[in-house]
């Protein structure tokens, strides 16, 4: 009854209700249905537009630093237009911080594939170092739905599985809005994300419950308005290229 009244009120005021984290399934539930598989169209490069900040152009990591030892050089391998995770060196992060952004990033899972579930081609793109879009080889590789490729890790499975086979380049195009905090530090607006995987909509303006985490959903904690983008070292030699952002603030 109350829910119905709220719905009527929201409709009357024109406020839309965005997707929120499901309480129907426990986090990382293997019972949760797998998103349907969609075969994306052929790869098409998206060159950065004139107002983009290019974070990685295939040649150097000058715009990046070690995430574990900020200020020290990023230790991943750069070759032939890509950067590859070097296991054990830790994540890398952009020297510049960002809040609301449009982000384009291309990635490639190792071939031949090695490992199963979360141990196959795992990495991650963390907006503001806190909000992860999962990178995983999810081509013929079953894992929990909220942990597969293009999941908002531990919160939202992708709407569909638009993965390409390992060894093929894939794209993420992300629209991210940072959370807003009031003077007391309370989150008055949650972070929101829209994600296209290989040109296919997989996250439709979802509201994050807080930072992404493994086996927990921590609440928001007040942070700066601009923070680095972090790429994860999960031990697999995942490659990245063509990383650019447009500031939306
Ligand atoms: Mg990951």
Image: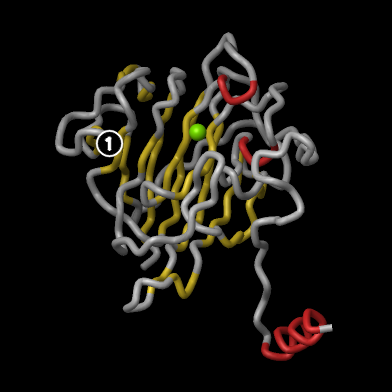
Name the residue at 15% across, 32% down.
72
Quarter placement of the N terminus: bottom right
Name the residue at 61% across, 37% down.
147
Frontmost residue, 8 versus 241: 8
Local crowd size for mark 1, using a 10 Å CA cut-off: few (<14), some (14–19), many (≥20): many
Say above or below: 191 vs 53: below
Frontmost residue, 13 versus 240: 13
What residue occupies the far top of the structure in this picture? 112
Residue 117 lies, in percent from the top left, at: 64, 23
Name the residue at 27% across, 27% down.
59
Residue 61 lies, in percent from the top left, at: 25, 31
Quarter placement of the C terminus: bottom left
State the colouring used for the structure image.
secondary structure
**Is residue 41 among the parts visible in the rendering?**
no
Frontmost residue, 88 versus 164: 88
Say above or below: 209 vs 28: below
Q: Quadrant of residue 225?
A: bottom left
Residue 66 lies, in percent from the top left, at: 24, 32
Disc 1, SS: loop
**Is residue 196 among the parts visible in the rendering?**
yes
- Is 78 left or right of 157, judged from the image as shown? left
Frontmost residue, 135 versus 163: 135
Name the residue at 59% across, 32% down.
43
What residue occupies the far left of the structure in this picture? 71
Residue receiving disc 1: 67
């Amino acid at each position: 009854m109350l829910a119905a009244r709220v719905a009527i009120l929201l409709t009357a005021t024109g406020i839309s209700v965005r997707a929120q984290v499901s309480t129907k399934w426990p986090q990382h539930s293997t019972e949760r249905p797998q998103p349907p598989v969609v075969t994306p169209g052929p790869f098409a490069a998206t060159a950065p537009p004139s107002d983009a900040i290019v974070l990685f152009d295939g040649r150097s990591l000058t715009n990046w630093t070690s995430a574990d030892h900020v200020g020290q050089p990023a230790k991943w391998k750069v070759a032939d237009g890509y950067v590859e995770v070097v296991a054990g060196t830790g994540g890398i992060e952009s020297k510049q911080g960002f809040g609301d952004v449009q982000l384009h990033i291309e990635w490639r899972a190792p071939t031949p594939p090695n490992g199963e579930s979360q141990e196959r081609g795992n990495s991650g793109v963390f907006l503001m170092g806190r909000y992860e879009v999962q990178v995983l080889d999810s081509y013929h590789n079953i894992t929990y739905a909220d942990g597969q490729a293009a999941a908002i890790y531990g919160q939202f499975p992708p709407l569909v599985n638009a993965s390409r086979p390992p060894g093929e380049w894939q794209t993420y195009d992300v629209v991210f809005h940072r959370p807003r905090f009031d003077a007391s530090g309370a989150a008055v607006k949650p972070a929101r994300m829209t994600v296209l995987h290989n040109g296919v909509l997989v996250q439709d303006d979802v509201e994050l419950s807080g930072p992404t985490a493994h086996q927990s959903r921590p609440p928001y904690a007040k942070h700066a308005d601009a923070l680095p983008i972090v790429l994860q070292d999960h031990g697999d030699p995942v490659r990245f290229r063509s990383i650019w952002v447009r500031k939306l603030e």
